Amino acid sequence: DTAVSQTPKYLVTQMGNDKSIKCEQNLGHDTMYWYKQDSKKFLKIMFSYNNKELIINETVPNRFSPKSPDKAHLNLHINSLELGDSAVYFCASSQGATKNEAFFGQGTRLTVV
Amino acid sequence: GIQVEQSPPDLILQEGANSTLRCNFSDSVNNLQWFHQNPWGQLINLFYIPSGTKQNGRLSATTVATERYSLLYISSSQTTDSGVYFCAVDDGGDYKLSFGAGTTVTVRA
């Protein structure tokens, strides 16, 4: 069983479209995250949720809206996609603030054309 | 926020060689992890090591928290060790990992 799974793995779409990426974890963790990896492979936090509550929104444009229907799921919806949104998006989860070992999904490569 | 520096940025090894990757961080940490991003893009957990020494097969890691650095050792490297190695830290209660820029390792047969 995959611990953190995200779908789709690849997403190619046109500018201006709206798209969603789904993430699920079966580790029983309380905290979930979205990270963005740019073309230079640099990884940066976008959002973190703890027990379905938004904890961090790291100055991400409001075209990006995370939604956590329950502790096991954190989805990412992106409106009005722009060329600069092309990147690899990773979902992750961890137990919480004390033992905070994070586990990552396989990534979603988003290409905006 | 906490700064993470990794060195060297690139490393080319002959199969069978040993190497050491370094991670320096600017503040005390609650969590430090090493990841391997393989050529298919997957981020694989190597070590959760906020302090001390751990070993897993040909890989080992040491974190000296008081001096704010961590080392990852690769022994008898294999071509499957190729990829990018990331160090990531959090300073506790912050609900985020700050990543270094990574070390790109290429192991040649």
Image: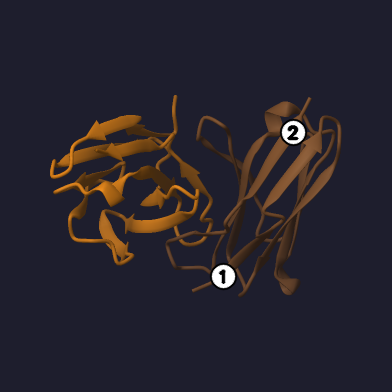
Chain A appears in which tint? orange
Letter of the chain shown brown in the rendering:
B
The reply to whether residue A31 is visible in this rendering is no
Q: Between label 2 and label 1, give the one nearer the viewer.
A: 2
The disc placed on residue B106 is none
Name which residue type carries label 1.
Gln
Q: Residue at x 20, y 53 (%)?
A: A65
Number of numbered discs on residues: 2
At which x and y percent is residue B105?
69, 41
In the displayed structure, B44 sits above or below B96; it is above
Q: Is residue B12 left or right of residue B95?
A: right
* Side of B73 relative to B83 (left or right): right
Is B104 displayed left or right of A91 in the figure? right
Badge number at residue B107: 2
Chain of residue at mark 2:
B
Q: Is residue B22 left or right of residue A3?
A: right
Residue at numbered disc 1 = B3
Residue A107 sits above or below residue A58 on the image: above
- Residue A15 image position (x, y, % from top left): 17, 43
Reading the chain from its start, which is encountered first: label 2 or label 1? 1
For the point 51% across and 68% down, the residue is B92
Of residues A81 and B23, which is closer to you in this image?
Answer: A81
Residue shown at 51%/35% (left/top)? B42
| Quadrant of the drawing holding the C terminus of chain A | top left
Residue A102 image point, x, y percent: 50, 49
